[in-house]
Every structure is written in structure tokens, then in C-alpha cells.
Amino acid sequence: MLDKLYITPKQWMHVLRWTLYTLLLLLAMMIQTVVLGNHTILGIHPDFVPVVIVCVCMREGPERGGTFALLGSLLWALSGADMGSICIAVLTIVPVIGGLLCRAVLVNRFVPCLVMTVLALLLEHTIVFLINFFFNGMAGILFLTDVLPCVLISAAVQPLVYLVVKRIEKVGDAYESI
């Protein structure tokens, strides 16, 4: 029975790859909540978790990356994120669609990943803003003063995250075609 539970060295490398992705996501969560929780960058609280989720999903493809996006956004929502259900939906759907587009039409490079990251950030923050605008009476000018700068500052971190994800992707062999 124990011989069926044997994990090959190649499989251990895949486990290491996904462990490193998870640690990167946890690092982004810790920086966003603990380090920058009470501090701001230019008066804005950046959002690093969507950047990590989108970069991993775009590099790993819609199947494996989509699973990571779903689990990562679920972890982020369960950690107490504001409007967590919206995070789960947007941070799963947008990266998977981006991965599918990159597979079918675009080349999976830096620029499409940056565009999908900005799109995911903008969509998530816009939906949260609209809900607060219509149901909580938030001022409309806050879209220009809070939401758009938050998207831009968060997207500014994307090149660094992309390089780290690209290096982690090289851990282990490529997956076999099914």
C-alpha cells in the first residue's frame, strides 16, 4: 500500500513550485495587511493580493492557474477582506479569461499579464466602489481620488511580482500534456 503513495522527485518539484506560489501569496497578504495596514503609499492603501493571483494564473495557464486563483481568492476572502465574495468572483474569472485569451490569441508575456492585472484590479475596485456608492452613500469623487490611484499604485508592483512568478515557474519540469 505504501508503494502507491510514493512521490517521485519530479512530483516533489511540483509540490515545491506550488508551495512557493502559496508563500508568495501569503507574503503579499502579510505586506498588505500587517506592514501597510495602518500606513499608506501616497495616501492610498495598495492591493497586492490580486496582482499575485493574476500573475500566477497567467503564467500557469487557465486550468492550474485558475485553481490557484480560486483557492487564493477564497483564502483572501476568508481572511476578512472587504467584499470578499466580489474578490472570489473577480479574482477567479478575470485571470482565467486572461489565461484563455493568452492561450488562444495573445502571447503569454509581460504586457498581457500587466493588462489583465490592471483589468482585475479596476474591475474589483469599481464593483466595490459602486456597491458602496449605491448602498452606503459614498461620494462619487472618491472614484477618482481613491479607486484609480489605488489601481495604479497596485499595478506598479506587478513587474516585480511577475519576475518572481516567472522564476518560480521554472522550478521543476513543465507539466506533461494530457
Image (cartoon, rainbow, N blue to C red):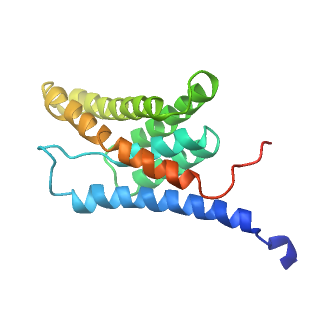
User: Where residue 102 appears, x then y in whole percent?
Assistant: 57, 28
Q: Which residue lies at the image location 65% right of the left edge and 59% below the top edge?
A: 14
Q: Is residue 89 above or below residue 8?
A: above
Q: Residue at x 43, y 56 (%)?
A: 25
Q: Quadrant of residue 60?
A: top right
**Which quarter of the rendered picture does the C terminus lie within?**
top right
Q: Quadrant of the N terminus?
A: bottom right
Residue 158 in the figure: left or right of residue 41: right
Q: Nearer the viewer, residue 109 or 84?
A: 109
Say if 109 sits above or below 65 in the image.
above
| Residue 49 position in % (x across, y down) | 38, 49
Side of 4 where 62 appears, left or right: left
Name which residue lies at 29% across and 59% down: 31
Image mark count? 0
On screen, residue 148 above or below 33: above
Query: Which residue lies at the image location 30% right of the left edge and 29% below the top edge?
Result: 126
Q: x%, y% of residue 24?
A: 44, 58
Give the left or right position of residue 91, taking residue 157 as reference.
right
